[in-house]
Amino acid sequence: MSKRDQQLIEQLQIDKIRKLISEIIPENQFYSDKLRNLDVEGIKILDSFRSLVPFTTKSELMEDQLDHPPYGTNLTYSLDRYTRFHQTSATTGIPMRWLDTEESWQWMLGNWIQIFNAVGVTKEDRCFFAFSFGPFLGFWSAYDAACKLGCLCIPGGGMRSVTRLQVMLDNETSVLCCTPTYAIHLGQTAKSQGVNLANAALKTIIVAGEPGGAVPATKQRIESLWPTATVYDHHGMTEVGPVSYPCSEKAGVLHILSASYFAEIIDPKTLEPAEFGVGGELVLTALGRSASPLIRYRTGDWVKQSKQDPCTCGTYDMGLDGGILSRVDDMVIVRGVNIYPTAVENIIRSYPEIIEYQVKLSTANDLDEMSINIEINGDNSVNRNQIVDCLIQKLYNVFSLRINVFVVAKNSLPRFELKSKRWIKE
């Protein structure tokens, strides 16, 4: 791909932005109010789009839905055109409801098909979707996209882990879609049941919903439990849809679908473009979801752009080094040290004996404290004290902090099917 191709992508994005805004105004009350003085013809380059169009925030959307229940005013068409209902998982507050027309839904399916193509999924595959199929968007669009691609699609809602595992083996499932946490849990379930996965038909695991697929130790852990499969990371949001696909050349890099999203990375404090290599908050404009649009949406995801121009895989699609590193508000400061959950997970997952963990944050004598509870497998040959000592030392080497580690009873920590909640603030 040449520099000329990059220019064509940017022009395509400008054309889609102008078309999107022209289509939603004046029908969409939310954006008509936000952009009442906008001259669409004045958006000629991406820099002018950045300077003329304000950010959209989650708090604005939530306030709008509270003031105009149940769906708010960010709807471009009459309600009778909407066929899909979803809502956010509410890990950071009140859930937001999101509606889609058939046209917007098909746009999202097209994005998922590109993701499937990127990881080698074809109509010959049998796909198992290990999530609850509740109102959270989850893998709903992935399921429909796989059906559209011609795959045999197996829903895993309403099943216990043992049952899901058996269904996967009985049907010779070749693709598994779930969260990184659940991929580990399902693999550990197989181990505890004496099921040998070395001969499983599974070849591809697509993980999403939380950081993990791009965390080296977590990816390695999953692939050690599922020796026939390769783990691929992906991310998306209920509000914007499926966003990224894994790079075929650079491990841990996610590329954003540039034909479907205009992406920016900003400093969350200054709201200016973040310096390259420093990291910042991901801002997305969904270019094809006009029914419930989002323009310059502050996602709250902390990312760092990877070096490209183009990427070694040949694309100019923006690359995110390490995928989604954390939520902007997930970073914690313990005695003056910035700590990100993904950094802690990468350390803990490097110990195969640790099967689950939980981080506790508290304040004692006006000092911030952090401790970690871990579950260790039941093998009596495992030297638990040695693992604890090694983990404490490794955490100290990385963060220059002494962090207490405690071994708790097996199966005493919660398990998660969707987004995990391992960090507890007391």
Image (tube, helix red, strand yellow):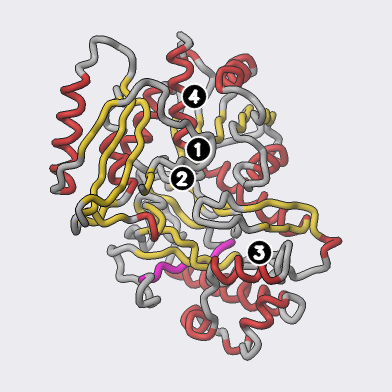
Query: How many other residues sit within 10 Å of disc 3, few (<14), some (14-19) or many (≥20)?
Result: many
Instruction: Determine whether, in the image, residue 350 is placed left or right of residue 178.
Output: left
Is 239 rendered above or below residue 122? Answer: below
CA–CA distance between discs 3 and 1? 26 Å
- Type of the residue with mark 2: Glu
CA–CA distance between discs 2 and 1? 7 Å
Query: How many other residues sit within 10 Å of disc 1, few (<14), some (14-19) or many (≥20)?
Result: many
Which residues, given as a range, are shown in magenta? 259-267
Q: Which residue is mark 3?
A: 288
Considering only order in the chain, which callout, 3 or 4, is on the residue closer to the N terminus? 4
Is 81 rendered above or below residue 350? Answer: below
- Type of the residue with mark 4: Leu
Q: Is residue 299 magenta?
A: no
CA–CA distance between discs 1 and 4? 11 Å
Q: Which residue is mark 1?
A: 179
Q: Which residue is mark 4?
A: 186
- Type of the residue with mark 1: Thr
